[in-house]
Image (cartoon, helix red, strand yellow):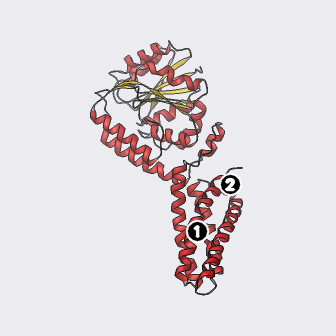
């Protein structure tokens, strides 16, 4: 039977606390104004966890069990969330480190349709958290890495207390590659870049001293995940804009990255283009006039510049609109050509310069139109029709 909430609890060898935790969750769900069920996702447990889970499902009509042959929190959530027919999909750790009082404010914005995802945050100013210094340092350090490397704006990536709307899950899950602990982070970053709304809830959280998570190994795997995801975002291989559009969460930056990242990539492409232009100009200048050398060098580098910015700076892939983009890029080139040609005329009007002086003046002129080019690419060339 379809319910509004599906609370998924991934477990691996949790025979000691599974029954008590599920009982607490069921009691709390009965205080909420929506229909709900609990799904126990057994990650290939080797103890009595599977037996206890089946016993709970037999005793409670609102408890289901899914058994997986392989371990992996992300793998379990993908499997259950993909098959669920509930409107809002919730995930929480079996140790119930997060106070269940935060469940109502977590899911309410998703039920109403205001937000697409919701996360419990241990790093919010009003959260009350009890954990050791080692875990606190690792958590804050990891979230700092996310803000710097992936430009993440959410505050806590790894709190085991999250929810997502079913329609958002169907769009995002195929884009998330990780099947383990980095799953949470990858899901949130992809959702944020697609322009989806992420709601954060302060939580009361008490560390589980018996947690079996290997912090060092998990941290290293997460860093590898950050590098992989960051590379995919730079290459523009994820269809983020389309996801935002299908979910009705389009924005000026959806699928194209934040302004700071765009500027960084634009500068890198621009530096490479400027160096290529200078080299081409010097080579062509030996056989033709500076005006023709300037025009041909600009034309050759402009085509490559537009293609590079199209893919790496603005994340546009495929053949759609590629001709239009190049034509508009050539219009922007015409403006640059006018500026640089004017600079050459001014230079030759006041002196009889050599090739070195010409290169310096033309390079300065090209840098002067860089800002105009970026604005034109962002607001005109690569705006989706």
Decide if residue 185 is on the left or right side of residue 362.
left
In this orientation, does residue 382 appear? yes
Decide if residue 324 is on the left or right side of residue 117.
right
Q: Circle 2: is it few (<14), some (14-19), or many (20+) Cα within 10 Å?
A: some
Q: How many labels does the image show?
A: 2
In this orientation, does residue 214 appear? no
Q: Mark 2 points at which residue?
A: 380
- Quarter residue 49 falls in: top left
Q: Residue 309 location in percent, x, y?
A: 59, 59
Q: Residue 175 location in percent, x, y?
A: 54, 43
The N terminus is located in which quarter? top right
Residue at 31% over, 35% down: 135
Identify whether 272 is placed above or below 81. Answer: below
Name the residue nearer the viewer: 291 or 255.
Answer: 291
Name the residue nearer the viewer: 273 or 175.
Answer: 273
Cα distance between the residues tagged 2 and 1: 20 Å
Residue at 30% over, 42% down: 216
Decide if residue 227 is on the left or right side of residue 377.
left
Q: Residue 225 location in percent, x, y?
A: 43, 46
**Counting residues from the N terminus, which is met first, the one under dot 2 or under dot 1?**
1
Q: Name the residue under label 1.
A: 366
Q: Label 1's element?
A: helix
Identify whether 284 is placed above or below 93. Answer: below
């Amino acid at each position: 039977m379809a319910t509004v909430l599906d609370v998924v609890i991934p477990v691996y060898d949790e025979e000691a606390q599974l029954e008590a935790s599920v009982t607490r969750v069921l009691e709390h769900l009965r205080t909420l104004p929506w229909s709900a069920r609990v799904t126990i996702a057994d990650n290939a447990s080797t103890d009595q966890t599977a037996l206890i889970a089946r016993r709970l499902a037999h005793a409670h009509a609102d408890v289901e069990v899914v058994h997986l042959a392989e371990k992996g929190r992300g793998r379990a959530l993908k499997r259950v969330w993909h098959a669920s027919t509930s409107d809002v999909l919730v995930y929480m750790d079996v140790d119930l480190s997060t106070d269940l009082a935060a469940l109502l404010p977590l899911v309410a914005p998703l039920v109403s349709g205001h937000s697409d995802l919701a996360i419990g945050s241990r790093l919010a100013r009003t959260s009350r958290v009890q954990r050791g210094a080692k875990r606190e340092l690792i958590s804050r350090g990891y979230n700092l890495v996310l803000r710097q490397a992936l430009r993440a704006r959410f505050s806590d990536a790894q709190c085991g207390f999250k929810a997502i709307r079913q329609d958002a899950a169907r769009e995002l899950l195929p884009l998330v590659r990780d099947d383990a602990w980095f799953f949470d982070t990858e899901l949130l970053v992809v959702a944020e870049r697609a322009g989806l709304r992420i709601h954060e809830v302060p939580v009361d959280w008490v560390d589980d001293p018996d947690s079996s998570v290997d912090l060092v190994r998990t941290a290293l795997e997460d860093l590898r995940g950050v590098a992989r995801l960051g590379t995919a975002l730079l290459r523009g291989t994820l269809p983020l804009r389309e996801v935002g559009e299908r979910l009705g969460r389009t924005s000026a930056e959806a699928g194209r990255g934040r302004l700071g990242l765009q500027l960084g990539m634009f500068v890198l492409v621009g530096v490479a283009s400027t160096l290529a232009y200078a080299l081409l100009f010097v080579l062509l200048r030996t056989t033709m006039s500076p005006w023709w050398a300037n025009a041909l060098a600009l034309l050759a580098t402009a085509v490559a510049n537009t293609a590079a910015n199209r893919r790496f700076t603005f994340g546009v892939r495929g053949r759609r609109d590629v001709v239009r983009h190049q034509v508009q890029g050539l219009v922007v080139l015409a403006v640059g050509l006018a500026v640089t040609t004017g600079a050459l005329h001014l230079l030759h009007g006041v002196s009889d310069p050599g090739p070195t002086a010409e290169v310096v003046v033309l390079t300065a002129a090209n840098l002067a139109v860089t800002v105009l080019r970026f604005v034109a690419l962002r607001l005109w060339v690569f705006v989706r029709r």
